[in-house]
Image: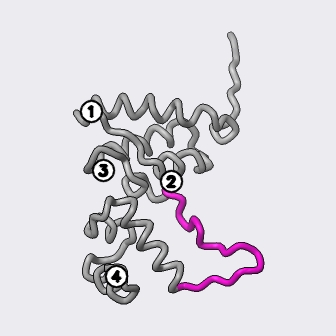
Amino acid sequence: MVKLELPALRERREDIALLARAFLEEFTRENKKPGLRFSVRAEEALLSHGWPGNVRELRTAVEHGVVLARGPEILVGDLPPNVRGAGEGMIPAPGTTLNLQQQEKASIVRALEECGGNRTDAAKVLGISRRTLHRKLHEYQLN
């Protein structure tokens, strides 16, 4: 009997993109979504996640993204919440202060970018109603 021990996926960062693309190919075929690809931010989220569930968790995350994707790209909002980089950018750099309004505005802008300007999808990603998003856009003069 041969025993193989592989390091955890978090220790094999170079394998994440390769595995994610293989899973993407598998699930796009299964779900009849040819040509689907990861957005830059979605790929960054996959690469920066710690993957405590190893390859199975990555496989599930990619499948989740394929199923939820509505356009030609899997966006960060299509990935499971634990993979999206929850809290990313929430901790200020040492010596700076956290301004909640600035953070909220930046989150709204980022969500709109990730969703290609689709306000309904951006509201879902942010976990707020479309009406609340509209009010915040007006408040921050982002119309």
Residue at mark 1: 34
Residue at image mark 4: 137
**Given the current orientation, which residue lies at the most extreme right position?**
95
Q: What is the secondary structure assignment of the residue under circle 3?
A: helix
Q: Which residues are magenta?
A: 82-100
The earlier-in-sequence mark between 3 and 2 is 3
Sequence order check, earlier mark of 4 and 1: 1
**Are discs 3 and 1 less than 8 Å apart at CB?**
no
Residue occupying image coordinates x 32% and y 59%: 116
Q: Nearer the viewer, mark 3 or mark 1?
A: 1
- Mark 2: give few (<14), some (14-19) or many (20+) Cα within 10 Å: many
| Residue beneath disc 3 | 68
Q: Is residue 58 left or right of residue 71?
A: right
- Identify the disc placed on residue 54: none
Q: Quadrant of the C terminus?
A: bottom left
**Residue at figure coordinates x 37%, y 39% from the top left:** 37
